[in-house]
Structures are given as structure tokens and as C-alpha cells.
């Protein structure tokens, strides 16, 4: 009788306890691990209505591989950005899509549709490595906590004195140029601001 009571109590206790435990991995964690095996980093991730998973990726190492011969360079031509970095192509997106279509059901991640694409010109910046890579570019960022009553800033991205510290120059009241120092963990959201060269008017 005592054994039966103890077993019932233990089952009830463990059941309520297990129900409060958060899952060890999230869909983003699973997708990031699969992408990393193929050499990609998940820059942004959205779970939209209708079971849509929208995934934005970049190369973990954007440095172009060194071709050993002219023939190899021709066969494995890569698209390069303005800094000489490798860009994400349709082939890369299709490669990850095929792997996710196969592996996500095995990992227990439910979805109806997948969209895998490059980060875009207004790509998101999340880590210190991202900010270092785009020093000198114009960014928009929103801080987690207000700084002098404001959270939104826009301007050129720079390096600060401290390790993994950055700056964004912005225009304050009265047109005064100011600078905000921040770390990646201080930022709620940051994106590049695409800048297009102005075309000269034809005479």
C-alpha cells in the first residue's frame, strides 16, 4: 500500500516537474547546427504564419578559397562582394533547403514551407564578428535600454577603444555630431543601411 502511494506521488511530482522544463533545443538551434555542418551561419530566423520558416544565411568564413589552378578557379567560380568576400548564391540556398527538408522532420521540427535566402543588403548584425566586418558602413541600431532617452540610432559604424566595443556616429539635437559606444549584447536590433551611388545626370 505504501509502495503504491509512493509510486503515485512520484509519478505526479515528476510529471509536473518535467512539464516545466524548457526544451533543450529550439528550432533555430537545430537549423543553425545543420547549416553549420555545411559551412553556413544563420543570420536571421523567422517563424511566420502558416508553418513558414524563413531563414537568412551567410558563410561562416566569407574568405574566398584559394584556387590551386586556373581550371579550378574557372570551375568553382564564386560571387564576390565589394570587400572581396564570398556571397550567398541560389545554389547555396538550394543546398541548405534540401538538407533541411530531409533532416528537420527527423529532428522533430514541424514546418509547412521553407524559405532560405541571403542576408540581403540590409543584413542584420548580431555578433561582434559581424560588427567588426562592417566597420565603416552605415548602420541602424536599436539598443536594449534607452540611452539619454532614446534607443534608435543611425550612422557610420566605428571601432571603440575597448575590446569588442564599437561606436555609431549620429546627429544629435541642433545638428551636433555625437557618438554612441556599445557592445553587441547592448543591441536589440542592428542592420546595414544600403547606400547606392548616385548616377550622374546626362547632359
Image (cartoon, rainbow, N blue to C red):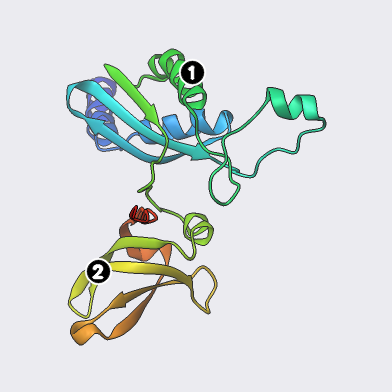
Residue 132 x %, y %:
52, 61
- Does dot 1 land on a helix, a strand or a loop? helix
Residue 26 is at least partly visible in this image: no
| Residue 8 image label | none
User: Residue at 25% across / 37% down in the picture?
Assistant: 20
Label 2 Cα neighbours within 10 Å, binned few <14 / some 14-19 / many ≥20: few
Residue named by callout 2: 145
Q: Name the one closer to the observer, 22 or 110.
A: 110
Residue 23 left/right relative to 118: left
Residue 191 x %, y %:
34, 54
Q: Earlier in the sequence, mark 1 or mark 2?
A: 1
User: Residue at 70% across / 38% down in the picture?
Assistant: 65
Residue 167 location, quadrant: bottom left
Residue 7 x %, y %:
28, 23
Q: Name the one closer to the observer, 31 or 63.
A: 63
User: Residue at 50% across / 34% down in the picture?
Assistant: 88
Residue 3 location, quadrant: top left
In this rendering, the answer to whether 36 lies above or below 81 is: above
For the N terminus, the image quarter is top left
In this rendering, the answer to whether 158 lies above or below 117 is: below
Residue 2 left/right relative to 198: left
User: Residue at 57% across / 29% down in the picture?
Assistant: 37
In this rendering, the answer to whether 187 lies above or below 55 is: below
Q: Gap in Å between the C-alphas at discs 1 and 2? A: 39 Å
Q: Name the one closer to the observer, 128 or 4.
A: 128
Residue named by callout 1: 99
- Does dot 2 land on a helix, a strand or a loop? strand
Residue 174 left/right relative to 90: left
Amino acid at each position: 500500500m505504501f509502495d503504491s502511494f509512493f509510486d503515485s506521488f512520484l509519478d505526479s511530482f515528476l510529471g509536473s516537474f518535467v512539464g516545466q522544463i524548457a526544451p533543450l533545443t529550439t528550432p533555430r538551434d537545430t537549423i543553425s547546427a545543420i547549416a553549420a555542418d555545411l559551412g553556413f551561419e544563420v543570420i536571421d530566423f523567422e517563424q511566420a504564419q502558416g508553418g513558414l520558416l524563413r531563414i537568412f544565411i551567410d558563410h561562416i568564413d566569407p574568405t574566398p578559397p584559394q584556387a590551386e589552378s586556373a581550371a579550378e578557379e574557372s570551375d568553382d567560380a564564386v560571387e564576390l562582394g565589394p570587400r572581396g568576400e564570398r556571397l550567398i548564391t541560389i545554389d547555396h540556398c538550394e543546398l541548405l533547403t534540401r538538407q533541411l527538408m530531409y533532416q528537420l522532420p527527423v529532428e522533430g521540427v514541424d514546418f509547412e514551407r521553407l524559405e532560405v535566402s541571403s542576408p540581403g543588403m540590409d543584413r542584420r548584425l548580431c555578433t561582434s564578428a559581424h560588427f567588426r566586418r562592417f566597420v565603416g558602413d552605415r548602420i541602424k541600431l536599436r539598443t536594449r535600454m534607452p540611452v539619454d532617452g532614446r534607443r534608435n540610432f543611425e550612422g557610420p559604424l566605428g571601432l571603440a577603444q575597448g575590446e569588442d566595443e564599437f561606436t555609431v556616429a549620429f546627429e544629435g539635437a541642433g545638428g551636433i555630431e555625437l557618438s554612441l559606444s556599445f557592445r553587441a549584447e547592448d543591441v536589440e536590433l542592428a542592420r546595414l543601411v544600403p547606400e547606392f551611388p548616385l548616377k550622374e545626370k546626362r547632359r
